[in-house]
Amino acid sequence: MIEISEDESYEDVEIDFTFSESGPEFGDLFTVCGYVNPNFPPKGEFNFESLLPFKISQIDDYFGIPFETNEGDEVVVWLYPRIDGEVVDRHPGPFSGLRLSYCTLRNPEERAKLFLELASAIEKNYSVTLSQSIESAERKIDAIVAYWSRKGIKVGSGESLEIDY
């Protein structure tokens, strides 16, 4: 297991995906929600059907998987569009990549599986390069869980949600 610093124990675990070729426009990306946005029709060059089982929704200017119980954070996994390495909002695209973000401290331990499965689905179904391996992200999640466990705090608990950082 890797050792992390106190600062790292608060950080979200992120994986950036960069498309090998031209990326999706907003209308294409919006189809991860399971329907077409009438204001932004998809160009049809990207098929995000493989991500539909994850029940991704538009949340504010971004996308995410909202929680289904009252445990943990309000959004389990965030999905952000990126252009030239930077997260963008209110942008029509095309996007050069996506960022997945997961807050280990704020979510019950078993929810990490959702983040890792979504990352695997993106890697498997789209021509992308990753900023770090999924295994590396999993090791960081495990290290954060262990860090807080040593302090007597269970990730995703009411106590973890009260931690101000």
Image: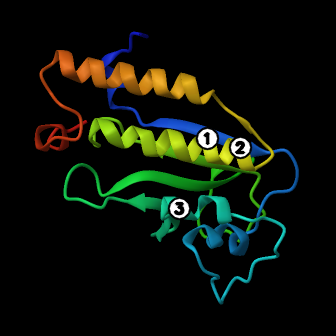
Q: Residue at x 15, y 27 (%)?
A: 153
Q: Nearer the viewer, residue 9 or 165?
A: 9
Residue 161: x and y, percent? 18, 44
Q: Residue at x 26, y 41 (%)?
A: 108
The part of the image, by quadrant, that contains residue 12 is: top left
Q: Residue at x 75, y 77 (%)?
A: 42
Q: Is residue 85 visible?
A: no
Q: Is residue 149 visible?
A: yes
Question: Mark 1 or mark 3: which comes first in sequence?
Answer: 3
Q: Which residue is mark 2?
A: 124
Q: Which residue is mark 3?
A: 53
Distance between the alpha carbons at the discs numbered 2 and 3: 15 Å
- Mark 2 crowdedness (10 Å alpha carbons): few <14, some 14-19, many ≥20: few
Q: Which residue is mark 1?
A: 120
Amino acid type, residue under disc 3 in the picture: Pro
Residue 17: x and y, percent? 68, 42
- Give the answer, above or below, for where 76 lies relative to 44: above
- Give the answer, above or below, for where 93 lies relative to 164: below
Q: What secondary structure is marked by label 1? A: helix
- In the rendered image, the quadrant that contains the N terminus is top left
Distance between the alpha carbons at the discs numbered 1 and 3: 13 Å
Q: Residue at x 66, y 32 (%)?
A: 131
Q: Residue furthest bottom?
A: 38
Q: What secondary structure is marked by label 3? A: helix
The part of the image, by quadrant, that contains residue 6 is: top left
Q: Are marks 2 and 1 in contact (CB under 8 Å)?
A: yes
Question: Mark 2 or mark 3: which comes first in sequence?
Answer: 3
